[in-house]
Structure formats: C-alpha cells, structure tokens
Image (cartoon, rainbow, N blue to C red):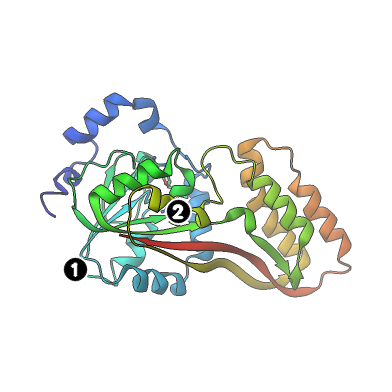
Amino acid sequence: MSDTYESARDPISSPTMTSYADRDKAFLNRSGTDGLTVDELRSTRAMWWDRAFTEMLLAELANPRRLVDIGCGLGAAAAALLPELPGLQYVGVDIDRMRLALAAPATYVAACAEALPFPNGAADVALFIATLQHVDDPVIVLREARRVAHRVVAVEPDNVAQQFYFGERLPGVTAASAALVSTVRRGDIAIGPRVPDLCVEAGFAAVRMRAYAIGVFRRGNADAFADWLRPILRIVDERLGTEVNCDAEISAWRASVPGNPVRHCGVVVPTIITHAS
Ligand SMILES: C[S@@+](CC[C@H](N)C(=O)[O-])C[C@H]1O[C@@H](n2cnc3c(N)ncnc32)[C@H](O)[C@@H]1O
C-alpha cells in the first residue's frame, strides 16, 4: 500500500494528478459540487454524524487495513475512523482541493472519482459517504472503485424522502423540502435505493443493501425550530435559485402553531448502505 499511495505524499503535484488535471482542468478545479460551502458541510456533518453513525460504519467496514474514502470532503470519516482503527491506512480522495486543504489530519489526494490515481486492487475497501449522489455517472465511478478496491461500502441518502417533525410529522415543510431537493439537477440526491442496482451494472457480483436513518432531533420551542429550519432549507433554495418557497411553508407552519410550545423536533433522512464485492 505504501507504493500505492506514493502520490499521496505530494498529492497536488503527483504525475498522475498532473496528467488528469491537464485533461480536465475545469472539472478538477470546480468547487462545491454538492452546493455546500465548507462551513455548511462541516455544520451539517456536526449535526447528524454521532457516535452511533461511527459505530455503524465500523461494523460495516469490518476492520479494513487499506481504505480509500472517495469524495472524502473535509475528512469527516478520517476524523471518526482513524482513532478507532490505529493500523488503518487511510487515503481520502476528493475533487475539491479547497476542502482537502481544510480537512481533518490524514492523507489526501486531489483526484476525480472517475480516474483514481491508484493501481488495481490497492485497497481493501472503497468507502462512499454521500458522494455517489453528486457524480455525473455513478456506474463509471463504481467501476473505478471496483478496479481499485476489493469491496465497496456506500452510504447514500434518499434526500427526497426526508421527513421533518415537530412533535408530529410536518407535511407542508416536508413536501416543500422534497420539492426543493428534487430540483437538484446535477447528480441524484435520492440515489440511495438505486445504488445496489448500479453496483450490479458496474460489475459487482455480490451486492446487498440495508437501511439506516440519519437525522437530528432536539427538544425546542416552535420559534427556535422555525429558525433552525430556515437556513437548512435555504441552502438548496439559494444555491439553485428554485421557485419552491420554503420560507413561506415554514412561516405557514409557524402561524398554525399557537403560542410557542416545546416539542421534540428535527429531521430524519433514510439512508441506504450498500455492500458490493
Ligand atoms: C456531500 S460531500 C460528502 C463528503 C464526505 N464524504 C462526508 O460525508 O462528509 C460529497 C463530496 O464528493 C466530492 N465529489 C463530488 N464529485 C466528485 C468526483 N467526481 N470526484 C471526486 N470527488 C467528488 C465533493 O467535492 C464533496 O466533497
């Protein structure tokens, strides 16, 4: 693996990366393919990435020795996994150099998931967390992961099916959110349930899926919850210039709740974990 990750010592100027960058500079230099700023990515991860999620990942990954984290972003997986797996050889790959520069301490390579700068069979596991939802052609990316790793663990959401609650389900806000996120044009933010079939298309023989819910719940009053909802839904609204007015839905919901009651509230997002080998 040390040879394999030679380029990681100087990821930005490694020969492999230079040639790929020359081929597709515009793509490589593009930033924020998921439409999130660094702060937004960090704060959303801080919101839902809890101890239970890390334990779930550890169980699913089954003690890998060499792991490539494809679309690693700010290295949230490195920060969670490296302290738990001291012998792990981890390399994070992302197209976004700015994120890698700000990522948690670990080894990173700036590269496209479509052309990884590693030889065949270099890693035990290729990990995707919320990456396949943002790529142009997930089958190409999965084929590349299959070339590089013996197995794949993909944790991908069904964002269109997310549900908002304030003591009970909020159909208006949930519907506005679904309408909003379904307008994301690049990638497929509801890719989770499709990943197992995409793995078959990419040539994996053994594929299995299971569900895991991510989300965040707290106890708070109605005003605080409305204030919490607005920036979450605005992220997509502003980035995409969509016509779905989530602010109006949130205001309508707030007006329908008399007083300022305290309830358990939050959001849950169905997430599909796919194992492929
Ligand atoms: C939603 S973020 C997830 C980051 C990280 N896995 C996490 O869960 O915190 C998706 C990441 O995939 C990266 N990405 C998108 N398309 C890519 C591609 N074609 N090649 C490499 N990385 C890509 C983005 O730059 C972004 O950092």
Query: In this orientation, which residue lies closer to the viewer: 169 or 136?
Result: 136
Write the residue at 29% across / 25% down. Answer: 23
**Residue 248 drawn at (x, y percent):** 80, 48
Mark 2 / mark 1, whichever is N-terminal: 1
* Amino acid type of the residue that numbered disc 2 sits on in the rendered structure: Asp
Which quarter of the figure has residue 169? Answer: bottom right
Instruction: Please identify, in this view, whether the residue under mark 2 or under mark 1 is nearer the observer.
Output: 2
User: 258 above or below 161?
Assistant: below
**Residue 119 drawn at (x, y percent):** 17, 45
**Residue 98 drawn at (x, y percent):** 38, 40
Query: In this orientation, which residue lies closer to the viewer: 228 or 124?
Result: 124
Write the residue at 44% across / 36% down. Answer: 31
How far is disc 2 from disc 1 in space, using C-alphas? 33 Å
Q: For residue 73, say whether it is visible.
A: no
Crowd tier of the residue under label 1, counting other residues whose Cα lies within 10 Å: few below 14, some 14–19, many 20 or above:
few
Which quarter of the figure has residue 20? Answer: top left
Write the residue at 76% across / 71% down. Answer: 168
* Amino acid type of the residue that numbered disc 1 sits on in the rendered structure: Gly
Residue under label 1, please give it.
87
Residue under label 2, please give it.
197
Marks 2 and 1 in Cβ contact (< 8 Å): no
User: 46 above or below 38?
Assistant: below
Write the residue at 53% across / 38% down. Answer: 186
User: 82 above or below 70?
Assistant: below
**Residue 172 drawn at (x, y percent):** 79, 56
Crowd tier of the residue under label 2, counting other residues whose Cα lies within 10 Å: few below 14, some 14–19, many 20 or above:
some
Residue 166 placement, left or right of 204? right
The kind of secondary structure element at disc 1 is loop
The kind of secondary structure element at disc 2 is helix
Query: In this orientation, which residue lies closer to the viewer: 162 or 258?
Result: 162
Residue 36 placement, left or right of 175? left
